[in-house]
Image (cartoon, helix red, strand yellow):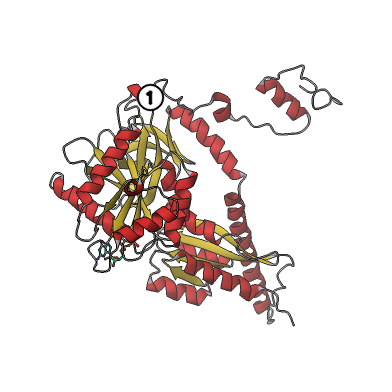
Amino acid sequence: MKRAGMEDDMSYDHVLTADYAALLAEEYNYRPIFDDELGFNLFARPPHPDPTTLPTRPPIVTIMGHVDHGKTTLLDTLRSTAVAKGEAGGITQHIGAFSVPVPGGSGSITFLDTPGHAAFSAMRARGAQVTDIIVLVVAADDGVMPQTREVLELIKKDENVSVIVAVNKVDKPGADADKVKRALMAEGLELEDFGGEIPSVEVSGLTGKNLPALVETLSAVAEMKDIRAERDGDVNGFVLEAKVSKGLGSVATVLVTRGCLKPGSHILAGCANAKVRSMADSAGKPVKEAFPGMAVTVSGWKHLPTAGDEVLQGSESDIKKALSNRERKADQDSSVRDVDAINEARRLERERRQLEEQAEDAGKVFVAEDAPKGPMKVKLLIKADVSGSAEAVSGALHNLGNDAVKSQVISAGVGDVSESDILTAKAAKASVVAFSVKVPKAMELLAHREGVPIMSSPIIYRLVDSVTDAVRDKLPKVV
Ligand code: GDP
């Protein structure tokens, strides 16, 4: 404890217990908060003392590159060949990741299929966090493009990630793989062909040419990296996707990075917890145990977690404690202020209606007062297809504008635009932003009737443009 008047560089003469500190705080009319998670270091599973003794795990691979260079096609072909080779039955679903066996029976490779969308920078950055190897796809008929350079920048920043170049579309008449490789060299990527260490494979996602070679190269790189993890004990992992599913409630894809996930485990991701009810792979087959490198859909969540959140396992009571800590912290952040904003807007709307009715009864016309002065807001209620994109869209659309007018995301959720979205937006005087979700015709009509603007697009930058326009429209006109 520091005595009054002590200089900063002087020593402390007391260490307070949490209880005593709390008493002191209360004496000065402060409400103390105990942070159990920090205090007990609840979820820090210590690193293994000798990782070289652990079993190997499948590498986690992300495919990146410029738009239209063939990422989706490549993923689709890899997935369908994997399904054809695997056991029969089961329709593959998009769950955020899938597994491809390595020819020769030596393990498998886990591919993340986070949307290869150009604007998914938030998720892409996350993808790289859990990624061991990036496959940089460059179309042989197009060469190095702006998003190719973005990936090169990302690779430079993350020294833990390895890279393989897939020169794609080599089936095309105008393809010039050598030119592409020289261009990559010029960008500073040291390819094997030129004496460097980065392998490249010439492929066609469309015809499937050389995809086995790509898988083998990935397997060789993974072997060199010697990727190992515990297959037992508490789970660590990441949420890849989350959505509400009919019949199953909140379902999230969890990519396991350590430990073993089983039905009955208590897990936590952000402010959402689950007692794992059931797990399934991308073919929809039930899974009893999920080991590192595996991605499984998990049901049993009390709330919908957010894509990119870290998954941790603990006892039921520890998770409860951590959850209440996290919820309290979340209380202090903007999302709750946003709920307040919605409630306040609803209250004002009710008052306005009452005044309108009273005025009507008295045979008068009610005229609302002008909005209070200060920075104006273009409020947005966001609906997106998956929680990762809801977050990415919120990030892109929040706080556009200047000191006079700014955009503000008041809520962001998953699913098609519903009646309650439109009524909430009306109450809060907000616009609805629909990203890659349906706006049913009836909802369009309702929005029109209620005067709620809807901005709908599957492309983030178009939404950015629409919101910027809305902000500009609100700017005070210079006369
Ligand atoms: P993404 O934006 O990177 O996901 O690219 P897509 O996979 O959507 O591919 C963009 C376009 O290129 C589509 O019309 C594909 O059919 C085409 N394409 C993708 N891969 C190949 C390939 O290997 N060869 C040829 N000829 N076309 C391809």
Residue at x 58% of width, y 72% of height: 470
Instruction: State whether residue 317 appears in this view.
Output: yes
Q: Quadrant of ligand 1?
A: bottom left
Seen from this angle, which residue lies furthest top? 13
Residue 164 shown left or right of residue 104 in the figure = right
Mark 1: few/some/many CA within 10 Å (<14, 14-19, 20+): some
Image coords of residue 11 (percent x, y): 78, 20
**On the image, numbered disc 1 is attached to which residue?**
51
Q: Is residue 167 above or below residue 308?
A: below
The answer to whether the residue bearing label 1 lies less than 8 angstroms from the nearest atom of ligand 1 is no
Instruction: State whether residue 305 appears in this view.
Output: no
Q: Looking at the image, which is closer to me, 274 or 199? A: 199
Residue at x 84% of width, y 24% of height: 6
Q: Name the quadrant containing residue 472.
A: bottom right
Image coords of residue 83 (percent x, y): 18, 49
- Tell me the SS state at disc 1: helix
Q: Looking at the image, which is closer to me, 181 or 38? A: 181
Q: Is residue 435 above or below residue 108?
A: below
Residue 456 shown left or right of residue 260 in the figure = right
Dividing the image into 4 quarters, which one contains the C terminus? bottom right
Q: Looking at the image, which is closer to me, 366 or 329? A: 329
Dividing the image into 4 quarters, which one contains the N terminus? top right
Residue at x 68% of width, y 81% of height: 365
Residue at x 23% of width, y 40% of height: 286
Mark 1: amino acid:
Pro
